[in-house]
Image: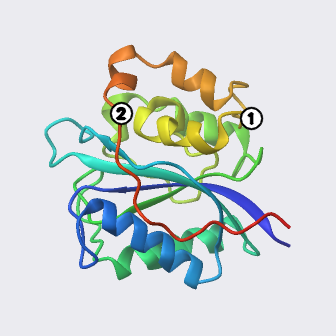
Amino acid sequence: MVQEFLIALGSNLGSSAGGPSATLAAALAALTAQGVGLRRVSRFFATPCFPAGAGPDYVNACALVRAPLSPDALLLKLHAVEQAFDRERIQRWGSRTLDLDLLAMADRVLPDAETQTAWRTLPPEDQTRASPETLILPHPRIQDRAFVLGPLADIAAGWTHPLLCRNVAQLLADLPPGDRAALQPLPAMPLVKPEQPR
């Protein structure tokens, strides 16, 4: 069965495909070549490096995709594309050539509400050290990050977090004004054309 997913893309080092923007565009093309359909793609945004001082600033985007895959199977495909663009998993939240995150699948909560809530409410000091051994949906940091919510508002402003019961536009408005102001849309780049709804 074909499912729809929200994914986030980011790069601050660039890759063999070019700088960060070129890398994101090439990654979207690579996903399409692997049978992942693009329904909508956000603008690209220049965003401050997170955490602050950890490296060059990022280019971030989000996409609504569709594929006949389970969430775990799509995550494996995302990781394969990351590797194809020189991604090395050395440091959590470190600089990277390409980062592809699975954010959400409609209103699904995985593996369950208790686990998702535990990771979402993890104390900040533990977030850099701990990483889950299973896929958590929605992504446990989605509500905290302007560099995700800003691009996501371009393509899915009405998507509602199934446990927080707030949509993307509301979650973005909840963030500090300085976080929102730091999002800088970049000039449009030629992208893989999103597929037409069927």
In the image, what residue type sits under mark 1?
Answer: Pro
Q: Name the residue under label 2.
A: 183
Q: Say which residue appears at 33% left-offset and 77% top-offset.
A: 85
Q: In this view, does 176 lie to the left or right of 56?
A: right
| Vertical relation: 122 (above or below) 97 | above
Structural crowding at the residue carrying mark 2, measured as other residues with C-alpha within 10 Å and reported as few (<14), some (14–19) or many (≥20): many
Q: In which quarter of the image is the C terminus?
A: bottom right
Residue 118 occupies quadrant: top right
Residue at screen point 43% across, 34% down:
145
The N terminus is located in which quarter?
Answer: bottom right
Q: Which of marks 1 and 2 is nearer the N terminus?
A: 1
Is there any visible trace of residue 164 in the rendered image?
yes
Q: Looking at the picture, how far across and down is residue 162, in whole percent?
A: 74, 35
- Contact between marks 1 and 2 (CB within 8 A): the answer is no
Q: For residue 162, which numbered disc appears in the image?
A: 1
Q: Give coordinates of residue 69: x percent, y percent.
A: 72, 74
Q: Mark 1: which secondary structure? A: loop
> Few, some or many C-alpha atoms within 10 Å of disc 1 (few <14, some 14-19, many ≥20)?
some
Residue at the image position 30 percent from the left and 40 percent from the top? 47
- The answer to whether 148 appears left or right of 85 in the picture is right
- Secondary structure beneath dot 2 equals loop
Q: Residue at x 30, y 72 (%)?
A: 87
